[in-house]
Image (tube, grey):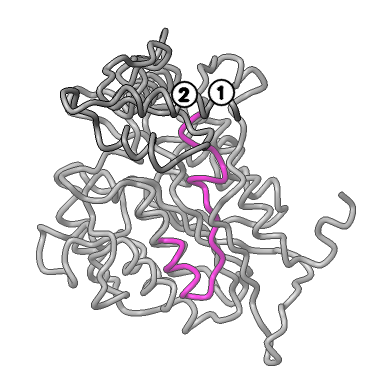
Amino acid sequence: MKNSNLFNKSKRESYSADEPVSTVEKIAAEDLGDSDLEIINLDDNDTDDSYDEESPQKGIFRFLNLHTLLLAVIVFVVVICFFRLKNWGVMIDLNEIFQDGPGTYEDTLDEIVPLLDANAQPIIQDKLSNIVVFGNAPFADDRDSTDNLANMLADLTGANVYNCAIGDSKLACKLEYIADENNVTDVFSFFYLTCLAAGYEYGPHFAEAKGVLEPLGEYPEDADEVIETLTTLDFNTVDAIVIMYDATDYYELSRMYNAENSQDITTFTGNLELGIAVLQSVYPHIRIVVASPTYAYAVDEDGKYISSDQYAYNGHDVLSSYVIREGVSSISSGVSFLDNFYGTFNEDNASDYLEDNVHLNKKGRELVAKRCEYFLNYYIKGYGESE
């Protein structure tokens, strides 16, 4: 380390009283001796230009920080949301969907309930001989025509069908009893007709109704025939009964049901339940099928046909609610329920089967007749074996 010694010697010789020397320089010169450490002059302000403590990042990276990243994420999310909203779902062509027809509803409220023997086993009948139908327009329209629904049913089953439907009637009564001429039309409801069938003494009420309504031209033209049939037919020979009322109760704002009294005859379902109970109490051997209203259009204030599944008259219920409640009442009464509303035709194709907003045309009657025939023959021996 010869060079280092020379350096240290020259440094010592260069110190004098007139020249201030930093403490670090003295310590380095006197105490370090032959050390290889390089003397650092702290008074030297020169810096290394190769390192700049404040030097910014180069290029695009100088803009990257937490705030810009967060802003970028927000902008990305907004763009994605806008794109999804503008392109929500897939545009479809209804003509392409319905090119093979409107399709069918697979889910219905249909329930086929058998009569049971003493061992709670289904009773299988040999054949259907006599059927009675109750209701209004579906069975009453074109009464004497081969296109009448009851007559179609007779052709399909081979049975005698007794038509006890009254066209201008509905299920729910105005009052719980016949008070005066203001509610004499209640006698044409289902409950009072079943009382006639059961042999109860309700004849005077019907006579009173005729006396009030006939002079006004409001007496139902099919009432006399129905009354005669109900009072003369031997119901002990009847195998089955079909009950079908259309959407009239919906249009006329009948109360749908009474939660306090399930057999309230002033309600749509209550009148039905009490009438069924009357028949079951007197004729327990008869299988009963309740057929719901078919789909029918509502009519708005401008006379336009609209969906009855969306339109509630005066805040009452939509038609499908009446159908659902009728199904509940039927099952609770232990009888079969034929769901025409969803199972026969529906809102998508109703115009093909209706003459107007509610009355069945020939095609509509044919569909209903086939469905009724299936329900009636379901527990007939050998039915369906040849199909």
- What span is colored magenta in the figure? 326-348
Q: 10 Å neighbourhood of mark 2: few (<14), some, or many (≥20)? A: few
Left of 185 or right of it: where is 288? Answer: right
Residue on which the image places disc 1: 3
Which residue is drawn at the image coordinates 37% and 25% (left, top)? Answer: 11
Q: What is the total number of numbered labels drawn onto the structure image?
A: 2
Residue 17, percent from left and from top: 18, 28
* Identity of the residue furthest to the right in this view: 386
Q: Does the image show residue 296?
A: yes
Left of 161 or right of it: where is 139? Answer: left
Q: Amino acid at mark 2?
A: Phe
Q: Nearer the viewer, residue 312 or 130?
A: 312
Label 1 element class: helix
Q: Are marks 1 and 2 in contact (CB under 8 Å)?
A: yes
Q: Nearer the viewer, residue 181 or 81?
A: 81
Q: Nearer the viewer, residue 43 or 335?
A: 43
Q: Does the image show residue 78?
A: no
Q: Which mark is residue 7?
A: 2
Residue 299, percent from left and from top: 27, 31
Which residue is drawn at the image coordinates 31% and 61% (left, top)? Answer: 268
Which residue is drawn at the image coordinates 41% and 54% (left, top)? Answer: 323
Where residue 344 sits, quadrant-wise, is: top right
Q: 10 Å neighbourhood of mark 1: few (<14), some, or many (≥20)? A: few
Work out which quarter of the rendered image holds the N terminus and state it.
top right
